[in-house]
Image: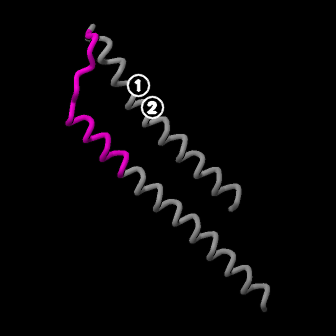
Amino acid sequence: MSQGMIFVLLIITITMIGGIMKARYGNHARRRDRHSDTLPHDDGETQRLKEEVRALKDRLQVLERIAVEKESSLNREIDSLRDR
């Protein structure tokens, strides 16, 4: 894998982790502001977050497939140029 592809995947991974942390810790901060000792259970929010994580995983799989396909096709082109 080229350094450019690794860099792109690293940026995507950092962005995803940041979004997950923001969602997780942002909710805890808002709940603390309510001065409540117990955390309310919000099925709607939990479901939304699960769907968002599922969508992000699907997007990551697509990006990984694109990166692998580009690398593979580039290798084939280089090999065909060598054969000339």
Q: Is residue 5 magenta?
A: no
Q: Position of residue 60 (x, y in %)?
A: 47, 55
Q: Residue at x 36, y 18 (%)?
A: 29
Mark 2 crowd level (few <14, some 14–19, many ≥20, 10 Å Cα): few
Mark 1: amino acid: Tyr
Residue at far top of view: 35
In this image, 55 relative to 4: left or right? left
Residue at far bottom of view: 84
Q: Which residues are magenta?
A: 36-54
Question: What kind of secondary structure does the magenta stretch mostly adopt?
Answer: helix
83 or 48: nearer the viewer:
48
Q: Position of residue 33 (x, y in %)?
A: 30, 11
Q: Which residue is mark 1?
A: 25
Q: CA distance from mark 1 to mark 2?
A: 6 Å
In this image, 21 relative to 81: left or right? left
Q: Which residue is mark 2?
A: 21
Q: Which mark is residue 49?
A: none
